[in-house]
Amino acid sequence: MPYAEDSFFTLSLQGQVGLVLVAAVLAGLAVLIVWRGAARWPRVLSVALALIVFTLFVWLSPQVYYQYFRLIFDGLPQQVVVKAWPDVGHVWRLLTFAERPSLSHHGQGLLGWVLVLIAVLRRRVAKG
């Protein structure tokens, strides 16, 4: 199994469920932003919005996840874990599933494609 060594599996069942819920809320917010923007904007701007929202997700979500880990692990210090804005190569590797295989990277890649598909197809659905 390619994910057998993923740190997700070191969490308790409650920790795993909580982490999935945090990820679902963050992904849902990203989807909502792109869904609403794509209903109003031309397709090219909607795709740009999808890529920007995806990059923001990649950039900022580690801080949200870290705050969740502070809730479930005693002794984690308060700190900023957000790094520099992700470069285009990193975002591309996530979208092409070429980044190191992990649940996190593959989930991010899947979210990126969902956002792009929403941006491309949303106006068609809204008019439809």
Image (spheres, grey):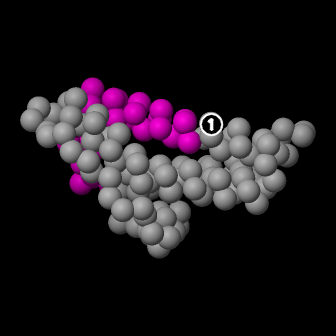
Kindly report the secondary structure that dominates the magenta region of the rendered protein.
Answer: helix
- Residue 125, percent from left and from top: 83, 41
Which residue shows up at 69% across the image and 40% down it?
35
Q: Amino acid at mark 1?
A: Leu
Q: Is residue 103 visible?
A: no
Extreme residue toward the left, this view: 75
What residue is pinned by disc 1?
32
Which residue shows up at 56% across the image and 50% down it?
53
Q: Does the segment drawn in magenta span residue 55?
A: no
Mark 1, other Cα within 10 Å: few <14 / some 14–19 / many ≥20: some
Q: In the rendered view, does 106 fall on the left or right side of 76?
A: right
- Residue 101, percent from left and from top: 37, 62
Please provide the residue range marked out in magenta.
1-30
Q: Nearer the viewer, residue 48 or 11?
A: 48
- Residue 110, percent from left and from top: 53, 52
Which residue shows up at 62% across the image and 36% down it?
32
In terms of secondary structure, where does tag 1 sit? helix
Q: Does the segment drawn in magenta span residue 23?
A: yes
Q: In the rendered view, does 119 fall on the left or right side of 128?
A: left
Which image quadrant: the N terminus? bottom left
